Amino acid sequence: MNIKSHFNVSSALKILLLMLFASNQHDVCFGQNLSTASADTIRQTVTEAGQAFKKGDLNQAVALINRSSDQIKRLAQESGNARSLDSLKPTYAILSKAHEFLSKKDAKALNDLPSWVDLKKIASEKAPTTPSEPNASAAGGVSFVDDVAPWLVAKCGNCHIDGSKGAFSMADIASLMKGSKAGVVLFPGDSAGSTIVESIRSGDMPRGGGKVTAAELAKLEQWIQQGALFDKAVATRPLKQLVSKSANGKSPGDSMEEAGKNMARNLANTKPTGKETVSFSRDIAPILIENCNGCHIDAPRIRGGLNMNNFSMFSKGGDSGEIVEPKNVAKSLLVQKIKGLSGDRMPAGGRPALSDDKIQLISTWIEEGAYYDGQSPTASLATINAKAWSDSATYEEVMERRRERALNKWKVAYGSQKPSEASDRNFVVMGNVSQAAIDEVLVTANQANEKVRKALKIDANDELAKGGVAIFVIKGRYDYSEFGKMTESRTLPNTWNSHWRRDVLDVYIAILHDSKDPKVNEANLTQQLASVWVSQFEETPAWFADGFGRSVLAITGGKSDTYGKSQLKNWDEQIGTIVRNMKGTKELLDGKMNEEDAALVGYGLCRKMIDVNGRRQFSNLLQSLGKTKSFPQAFQLAIGPMEPSIAAALGLPSVKASK
């Protein structure tokens, strides 16, 4: 083929070399990015296209570029938001050049390549990454559970089901669809572009688990090609359990329905009667945490398919089925295992057997109904145990534990640098500023506390947080940023001068200290204390708490000082632009917006409530929070259904209205 017919020699060689060596290019992006290996797959395909073209096979080159185009569109759909797509821009540039080159070659079969702008739109309108359609077997197609899962378990189980070699787990379908740290291995509708198929076809996989037959591989390809469909109910069910129940003569759908009923029964019966002598949160959770950690809790490799990270997972059981049968100690596999009556005694790994007292506690809990007395069943066992301890501890005991944890965080961030400290009943203040400055911040914190309490009409007997609030006073922007990186594993927005965090044992505020103007410190503390207060209510979104704090700053006199006035003006100016760029509320409610933009939307929503009918909506929300202790319930009572109400307030289309 005569390259000169459309390009000069140097241009053609440049593009051809780009295609040939695309796989050696690397995307570099700071912050969240898509999988490097996913991009590598596209670049490798572009390289293969260049090689095909060099050999004179235009049709093959076109087919490979079409595949790359489909792959990059799927990655855009799976990226979650437009910002995270930015890491693919260098790869897109390579693909775009190759596509442009072939488009000049009379390549009639070449599909259109979406523009970068179109890909960003696709990313913003994210399609679900995990199919939720019914099992394909119902429509006469390949059934994952019947036709694919059995040989995956038999031939890949040692490395990727019992373990996760290469950071790739196939313990359940959700993990398989997620892929590994190296990237997505399965693209629904594109078996040829799915790495898992190529690895098996080439003979690279499985290693030591037995050869996959041609018929088995064909079933896998057919399942992927028809969309990789599966029942939503089986997404997180252990593959070994699915295969076992299917082999026992029960249809996968029936097995999942029964399992779902069993789990629903367990969770539905988790409301204690008040007559129980053993508490799961207080008595059972710490036993599990101490003895099952590393194998079934926070484990890199979950043993036996039994995940105990939270009660929801615990109640599902593992490869052998459910491990607890309420009110039937003898038939509960958990008791059989810890007594050594069924297979290997647990805990394993050289750990000592449980004491008779601990076995009796577990037995009594099951005998009394195996009730769950924690918060959400998806909360970690450590969290529910901490909550149980906190509820029974005195204010002073919680405060001392909070101070100890705050000092530990300080050591993580700043090593052996000892902080200056001051405290009273409300606050524990520490930082890398002078003792005089720490003492001053303690006084300022109490002044800010009074402002917040007055504005929100908080009862004198109600604390902002049991055990008080820890305050980190940090000197310099660099040290403030390091605090976020080292203790919270995140990059703090560079516009922030303060932020808050709250969970059961840690309630704290971090501020960038201003040594020149105490009003700046007071404004930051007022804002963050209000956020801390509203975050105590169950299921309060972080974006709302952030915005709530900013709105309280506005109504407590923030406009009267230079710093507060500047902050409020800056926020007010940005809200309109951010809301105009939103296509709806989904990204906000799903937690996909960046923290600063989401906080500004929360601020705008709160200001809207404050401005409507003389703060009536805002006041109603505060009253409802006091009654229900649940943010979603309070919002429903005071304003209305959350999603459509937020959409209406922001002038955005409602998700429900669009369906």
Image (cartoon, rainbow, N blue to C red):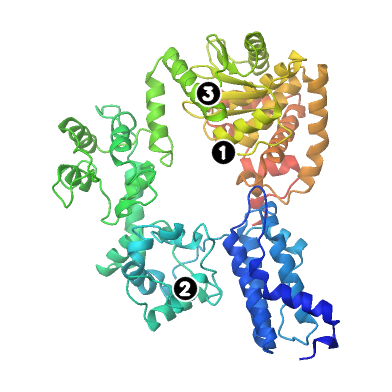
Name the side, left or right, on which 174 lies relative to 526.
left
557 w.r.t. 37: above or below: above
Q: Which residue is mark 1?
A: 489
- The residue under the point 67% across, 41% down is 645
Residue 168 appears in the rendering: no
The one of 228 and 414 positioned closer to us in this rendering: 414
Decide which of 324, 493 is in the foreground and name it: 493
Disc 3 marks a residue whose amino acid type is: Ser
**Amino acid found under the numbered disc labelled 2:** Ser
Residue 246 in view here? yes
Q: What separation in Å lies between label 3 and label 1 (alpha carbons)?
A: 20 Å
Q: Position of residue 109 (x, y in %)?
A: 71, 85
Q: Residues within 10 Å of mark 2 (few under 14, many from 20)?
A: few
Q: Residues within 10 Å of mark 3 (few under 14, many from 20)?
A: few
The residue that disc 3 covers is 416
How far is the residue under mark 1 from the one under mark 2?
Answer: 35 Å
Expressed as whole percent of the image width and height from the top left, the position of residue 501 reads 57, 29
- Gap in angstroms between the C-alphas marked 3 and 2: 49 Å
